[in-house]
Amino acid sequence: MNHTIKKLVAYYKPYRGLFLADMFFAILGAAITLVIPLIVRYITGEVIFEEPSLAMQQIVKLGLFMLALVLVECFCNYFITNFGHVMGARIEYDMRAEIFGHYQKLSFSFFDNQKVGQLMSRITSDLFDISELLHHGPEDLVISVIKIVGSFVILISIDVKLTLIAFAFIPVMLVYAAYFNKQMKRAFKRNRAKIADINSQIEDNLSGIRVVKSFANENVEMHKFEEGNQGFLSAKKNSYFYMAGYHSGLGAFTTMITIAVLVFGAVLITKGQVDVTDLITFLLYINTFTEPVRKLITLTEQFQNGYSGYERFMEMMAIEPDIVDRPAAVELKGVKGDISFEDVSFQYEEDSQKVLNHISLKVEAGSYMALVGSSGAGKSTLCSLIPRFYDVSGGTIRIDGKDIRDIKLKSLRDHIGIVQQDVYLFVGTVADNIRYGKPHATFEEIVKAAQNANAHDFIMSLPDGYDTDIGQRGVKLSGGQKQRLSIARVFLKNPPILIFDEATSALDNESEKVVQESLEKLAKNRTTFVIAHRLSTIKNAEKILVLTDNGIEESGTHAELLQRGGIYSHLYQMQFAE
């Protein structure tokens, strides 16, 4: 825990000046709160008994002095509320940038096992709680300690008996609050887990809203959401039960202290042991030392909330990406595009079945290689190993004779272009989405890439051409249009190695013809891997590999494989019959 707190404190470092100013004004504000009742005591105990005109002068002076103190205290409170929150927001900004950057480094295998909604809650609500703790924590602690200790010292110097009566309630208050806090901590932790589940469910529903509506399953989704929402409600009810006990109990304690001081003070006045002035002073101070007790306990609640959020933040930051650059990794330069698989095996998790088993394969630079086979045979997996979306479990993949694990990841992926069946387009314009292939491309380069991808004509027919907003995930475009934009992206990137992962299987015949032309244009003079479902699209491949659970069962050209009358021939006859 000490190490974790040290790391948490380190986030203040860039804002040391702001933090010290915040602390200074917090201390000054607390000191003013302690001084004002002393001035009231001086006025009621001494000034009013002086000669009237002199008393009047002093009352006016002290009144103006107290007014000045109130204005200073007002500024102190303004500063710590405004600039203190700004400091917290800046720290939150830094942490959000840190965790988002960390998400970018994590591998496919991490995202395969995560829910997007839960990852989002780590970057939003968790970080808000942490920033609130980092802003309020130190200042509330300092203010509370100054007010409690200051009140105690001042009051004990006035009257020991009344002080002991007033402060006798404090340990009981602390024990009471500690119990309720412990229960609240558990409840808040459950709340956090439940809201993360709900976020995940909402994200899943909204992303798949078209599927929901196409099946008219709104009621099913409502039922699923109702379950999660009900779980969150019961967790919230539980936390509010303890919160209500906490707040109402502390309010009762404050009132009891006032009553006890008033009753015992009145008894002592009748015995001539205490002045009315001192009793007034005690009553003025009650709020000064009970309010910080509340604040301290709220702080522990805030600490539980913020710290549990920080632990979740640290858990995420502690996850190491399983695919990283080796210490001596180099840039990939002058790529020809020779690719070889040497006895490659792969499994997704250690205890799972192998997807690829001892695959050996040589692909010469500039050649057009097609992969076919039944679903689950490992075609996409084999291609995912080339850009190191996953690392081989055994064997080696080489590009131009160099082990891909000895190449810097960014450099490796910069030289590979991928066109997938499920095109992901980002929110923004057509131009923004093509530019994703080369972020600093000129408009002329974007247009050239679109022309090469047979996309220019349809783009120009859109309402604002290249500046047309395509909506969330490109919902305003057809499947063929989206696919051509993704091909334009790769044209703009201009990589020497290409992977087409069933890029035309979801398209109609007309769109497929246009997209196929674009793909063949793109593949010219590049090492190309094509995963194909429709065998008609790969007749021109220089080599076709047939993958099954046993590995590479057949290889050859379209004509050779048909003549052989094996698995490929059987698959082709089935499709041709269809």
Image (cartoon, rainbow, N blue to C red):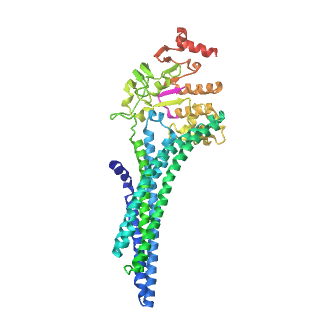
Residue 556: percent from left, percent from top: 49, 14
Residue 390: percent from left, percent from top: 43, 30
Residues 44 and 318: in front is 44
Q: Which residues are magenta?
A: 492-501
**Residue sitting at 55 percent across and 47 percent down?**
233
Q: Is residue 53 visible?
A: yes
Residue 500 inside the magenta-drawn segment: yes
Q: Is residue 93 visible?
A: no
Q: Is residue 402 above or below residue 551?
A: below
Picture quarter containing residue 104?
Answer: top left
Residue 362: percent from left, percent from top: 43, 19
Residues 312 and 302: in front is 302
How many marks can you see?
Answer: 0
Q: Is residue 256 above or below residue 185?
A: below
Quadrant containing the C terminus is: top right
Q: Is residue 140 above or below residue 343?
A: below
- Lateral position of residue 222 relative to residue 260, left or right: right
Q: Is residue 59 above or below residue 320?
A: below
Residue 229: percent from left, percent from top: 56, 44
**Residue sitting at 61 percent across and 39 percent down?**
223
Residue 129 inside the magenta-drawn segment: no
